[in-house]
Amino acid sequence: MISSRVNKNDTTYKVIKLSNGEDIIATLTSENEADIEIENPLLMSVFPQMTKSGELDSLNLSRWIQPYTEQSYFTLSKSTVVTTAVASPGLSRYYEYVLRRIEDWKGNNEETLEEISDDDVYDELLDELETQSKSIHWTST
């Protein structure tokens, strides 16, 4: 059995396409010939959104199995994984942001995740980017 442990200092996140059609983003923590272990998986859902410039796709990240368990590590059989890819830098920042918001929400329960607006997300991401431009676009054509 080949086993490789992922470096805990590696903040590379993986987009994982499952055979049931779901797309998740997670931290890959370990891997062997038959299984992969992931941490903090979030389900990726794309929804059409109407904007002034037309219809764009909007990405939503939500808890995957965690609503039903307190567990944060999961083992996936490689037979259920279609493919994996390294998440883009923008998606990685969005994933980290959502994880922070989930932790904040668990901690005080005063604010629900549904009350978090897209503007809140964009403003926090822009603050972290420290760029001159205030434009972030999550679009798909």
Image (cartoon, rainbow, N blue to C red):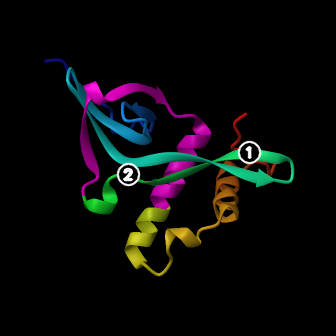
Q: Tell me, yes or no, whether the highlighted magenta stretch contains residue 119.
A: no
Q: Position of residue 109 (x, y in %)?
A: 42, 78
* Residue 47 against residue 29 in the figure, above or below: below
Identify the residue at image location x=45%, y=69%.
104
Q: Residue at x 57, y 34 (%)?
A: 88
| Residue under numbered circle 2 | 64
Q: Is residue 98 magenta?
A: yes
Q: Residue furthest bottom?
A: 110
- Real-space CA distance between mark 2 and mark 1, rounded to the nearest whole angstrom: 24 Å
For marks 2 and 1 on the same chain, the one whose residue lies earlier in the sequence = 1
Residue occupying the far right of the picture = 53
Under circle 2, the secondary element is: loop
Q: Position of residue 102 (x, y in %)?
A: 44, 63
What's the residue type where badge 2 is placed?
A: Trp
Element type where label 1 sits in the image: strand
Where residue 76 sits, quadrant-wise, is: top left
- Name the side, left or right, on which 21 lies relative to 8: right
Question: Does residue 5 show up?
Answer: no
Identify which amino acid the numbered label 1 is placed on: Leu
- What is the magenta range? 71-100
Q: In x, y percent, where is residue 31?
A: 25, 28
Q: Residues within 10 Å of mark 2 (few under 14, many from 20)?
A: some
Front in this rendered view, residue 16 or 79 = 79
Classify residue 20 as left or right of residue 89: left
Q: Quadrant of residue 82?
A: top left
- Which residue is under mark 1? 56
Nearer to us in this view, 107 or 65: 65
